[in-house]
Amino acid sequence: MTRERASLVSVLVLAGAASIAATQQRFTSKTIGVRVDVLVTNGHQLVRGLSAKDFELRDDGVVQAVSEVQLEGMPLNLILGFDTSGSVAGERLHYLLEAGNSLLGGLQPPDRVALLSFASRVRLLAPLTPSRQQIHGALSRLKAEGATSLRDATFAALALREDDPGRTLVLIFSDGADTSSWLRAAPVIEAAKRTDAVVYAVAIADRQVHVLMTTPTRSGLAMGAITQQTTTIVEEAGKFLENVTEETGGRVLFASANSDLRVTFEKTLAEFRDRYVLSYVPTGVSTSGWHRLEVKLKGKSGKVIARRGYFAE
């Protein structure tokens, strides 16, 4: 086994163990109840000023008595997963590092940050830590080269969620297709369904346009086949990110250019802080298995974005 494969295996084994541990403490206690992160938008604007009485929440079709969680004093766990494959080299990496360092400035003292990078393999550069200096240092050492292990990195990032009362935001940045993951999409999405972390993804808006505008050569048929295959891979990566974010109640946000990464990262953090956190003790439903969640507004206009459900263990 090569050193690269051994390193990836060790990360995935560690991630798998952490994921199992995390699922054992999610949504199991009726004292703790179930906590649901909710985003409300109206067009391109966030809807603020709502309270628990403005929401109707159904657990497996049964209406629940909802209370709103006060976020003051609730720490944030920010887990960063940065694509450092070869396509990120140069200007894009410069702006990615600028965006990551700027994001740290928007955190509160109790908040913690973890950083992992992914290219041909996944590297855990810093576990959850309150030390901004440690994260700044890890960012400064990032280099871009190799392929892209997007699914493996997303799984590892989800596994870093720890057993604490804080809220967890997983922020994944990638500029293209998954070309080297060992894991398929299904087990990663399954892991997302078993954690209370909210996943946001940031992508470069023009990545697919570049693929579609590839100029044919004399062997137009062969180049056309390559272009179609590449386009399909990119679309699959986008579909994967959409599925993971939708399962957890997050979103995919796009930066229109490399220089917009900082603003897009800051928007992601600000949006996460403006979400509502609803809590309830499950009543009239099974104590185990998959629970489908439906969250709606009562007498208000707006689109509600929340996780699709949860597993009761």
Image (cartoon, helix red, strand yellow):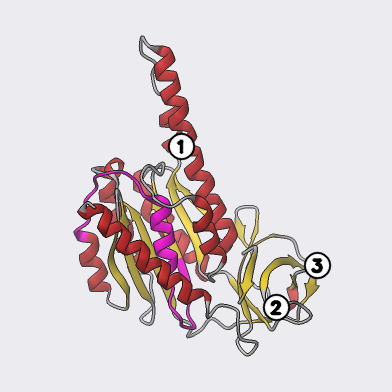
Residue 311 painted magenta? no
Q: Let me know if residue 213 appears in the view.
A: no
Q: Nearer the viewer, mark 3 or mark 1?
A: 1
Residue behind mark 3 = 299
Residue behind mark 1 = 233
Q: Quadrant of the C terminus?
A: bottom right
Q: Is residue 37 left or right of residue 293?
A: left
Q: Earlier in the sequence, mark 2 or mark 3?
A: 2
Q: Is residue 48 left or right of residue 107?
A: right
Q: Amino acid at mark 2?
A: Ala
SS at mark 3?
loop
Q: Nearer the viewer, mark 2 or mark 3?
A: 2
Residue 163 painted magenta? yes
Residue behind mark 2 = 52
Above or below 196: residue 99: above
Q: Give the CA separation, mark 2 to mark 3.
A: 13 Å
Residue 230, x across and y down, in percent = 43, 31
Q: Nearer the viewer, mark 2 or mark 1?
A: 1
Q: Farthest residue toward the front?
A: 1
What residue is at 75 percent from the left and 78 percent from the top? Answer: 53
